[in-house]
Amino acid sequence: MRHPPPDTRRNVIARAFGPTLFVGLWLLVAWRLLGFSGADSRWNDAACGAILVLLAVVGGTAAHGQRRLHLVSAIVGAWLVAASLTVEVSTGARLNDGIAGVVVFMLALSGASAADEAPGPPIGGHHRR
């Protein structure tokens, strides 16, 4: 499998963490703005949102290990989709978690496929020969 050059790979990784941060922040406040009923919806969204915000902040600043962080984000996204089918009570909460879960899952897969665990040359740098 061919990987994109390091600078392109870094851009893909950064683009995946930015929207993940936004989705995490949205999950933290959505239950208030949309008026979800039930404590399960609130705690589920708050916990997933906090995890996503943490992953996005750490992943956006980490030099290495982004692939693992993206994979954890993918698990959170899959959980949100599962929760939309099992835990959530209201239609709004189901739609919110389902859409957020799919978005996070797809972003995480995109970022994980571009992430390179091995240290490479600096962005814009050249290999020494």
Image: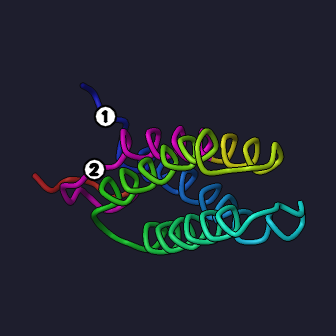
Please name whichever residue, 105 or 2, is drawn nearer the observer in this view of the structure.
105
Q: Position of residue 20 (x, y in %)?
A: 59, 57
Residue kind at label 2, given as amino acid type: Asp
Is residue 46 depicted above or below 86 in this figure?
below
Q: Position of residue 56 (x, y in %)?
A: 52, 66
Q: Which residue is mark 2?
A: 116
Q: Position of residue 105 (x, y in %)?
A: 51, 42
Alpha-carbon neighbours of circle 1 within 10 Å: few (<14), some, or many (≥20)?
Answer: few
Protein image colouring: rainbow
Q: Secondary structure at mark 2?
A: loop
Give the quadrant of the N terminus: top left
Please name whichever residue, 108 or 99, is drawn nearer the observer in this view of the structure.
99
Instruction: Tell me the tag on residue 3.
Output: 1
Q: Is residue 102 magenta?
A: yes
Query: Residue at 54% of width from left, 51% of height from top?
Result: 16
Q: Position of residue 104 (x, y in %)?
A: 57, 47
- CA gap between label 2 and label 1 equals 9 Å
Q: Is residue 13 magenta?
A: no
- The segment highlighted magenta reads 101-123
Please name whichever residue, 124 or 68, is drawn nearer the observer in this view of the structure.
68
- Please report whichever mark, 2 or 1, sits nearer to the chain's N-terminal start: 1
Circles 2 and 1 in contact, beta carbons < 8 Å: yes
Can you tell which quarter of the image residue 47 is in?
Answer: bottom right
Is residue 12 depicted above or below 50 in this figure?
above
